[in-house]
Amino acid sequence: MFLSIDVGNTQTSIGLIENGEVRHRWRLKTDRDDTSDELHARLRDFLGLRNLSLGYVDAAAVASVVPILTTMWRIALEDALGETPFLVRGSRGCCMPIAMPYPEQVGADRIANAVEARDTYGAPAIVVDFGTATNIDVVDGSRRYRGGCIAPGLMLSASALFAHAAKLASAPIEVPPAAIGDTTEHAIQSGLVLGVAAQAEGLVARIKAQLAEEADDIEARTAALACPVIATGGLSRIIGTATDVFDEVDMDLTLRGIWRIWQHHHA
């Protein structure tokens, strides 16, 4: 089995992959103070919950946006598996041309999303990842990573709202019954949840229009306007019920993308 680890700013996702499918998955809070020994112990405990052990793991890869934890996970996996894990980076070995002036600046999770979207859903494709930030990643018709958009995530916006608006109490993060909120709670939900959904709709429409404008012929233009839009990330199921802009909600996209990049690198 293959161990896929996606270290985000707020949460870390861990997946155990067999034959390209995520068989087991876990989430933990990302803590920049974690040591390699603590990560090794947590990994062992997670596997133990499913009556598994580190002996079931043949290889591992890490996509991390937290540099100190990239190092800690590398050491932890070296200790656990006896070999250095593959580290996903935009600057090398990502099996996708990056049509940007500074590829090394692209987050490893964004590259993983783009690679898996291309290989699973085709190109062009658009991925909207709802995490600490809302990231939109674009694969163009030439199967290149083109870039995308980065915006504050839903929970980040919610935290800022509740912290700085004294009369607004926190509200459950769920889809409201209507766009016009008839209570303060519904109004907050409309602004936050439907606001993020509307943001995705607007940006996706602009991205499709740009891809179509850049297309060389009618066939490529048509493909750009009809390209699949995939939602992923912890809040994608909630946002996915608030809009029809997504063709797929794929919760395991990033974890499989990490595995896909490792597979290409070792082919």
Image (cartoon, rainbow, N blue to C red):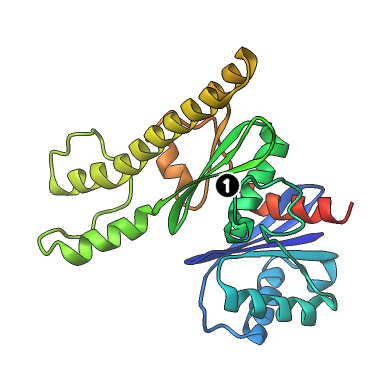
Which quadrant is home to the N terminus?
bottom right
Please name the residue shown 32% across and 51% down the image.
173
Please name the residue shown 78% across and 70% down the image.
85
Numbered label tally:
1
For this orientation, the residue located farthest to the top is: 218
Q: Between residues 129 and 27, which one lies in front from this camera angle? A: 129
Q: Quadrant of residue 6?
A: bottom right
> Picture coordinates of residue 38 (x, y %)?
62, 84
Q: Between residues 175 and 218, which one lies in front from this camera angle? A: 218
Q: Is residue 183 above or below residue 227?
A: below
In-image side of 115 versus 228 (left or right): right
> Visible in this render: residue 203?
yes
As helix, strand or loop, the secondary structure at mark 1 comes to loop
User: Which residue type carries mark 1?
Assistant: Met
> Picture coordinates of residue 47 (x, y %)?
71, 69
In-image side of 214 versus 98 (left or right): left
Q: Between residues 9 and 136, which one lies in front from this camera angle? A: 136
> Picture coordinates of residue 50 (x, y %)?
70, 65
In-image side of 266 versus 103 (left or right): right
In-image side of 60 versus 164 (left or right): right
> Picture coordinates of residue 146 (x, y %)?
59, 42
Q: Quadrant of residue 40?
A: bottom right
Badge 1 crowding class, 10 Å Cα cut-off, few under 14, some 14 to 19, many 20 or more, is some
Question: What residue is pinned by disc 1?
Answer: 251
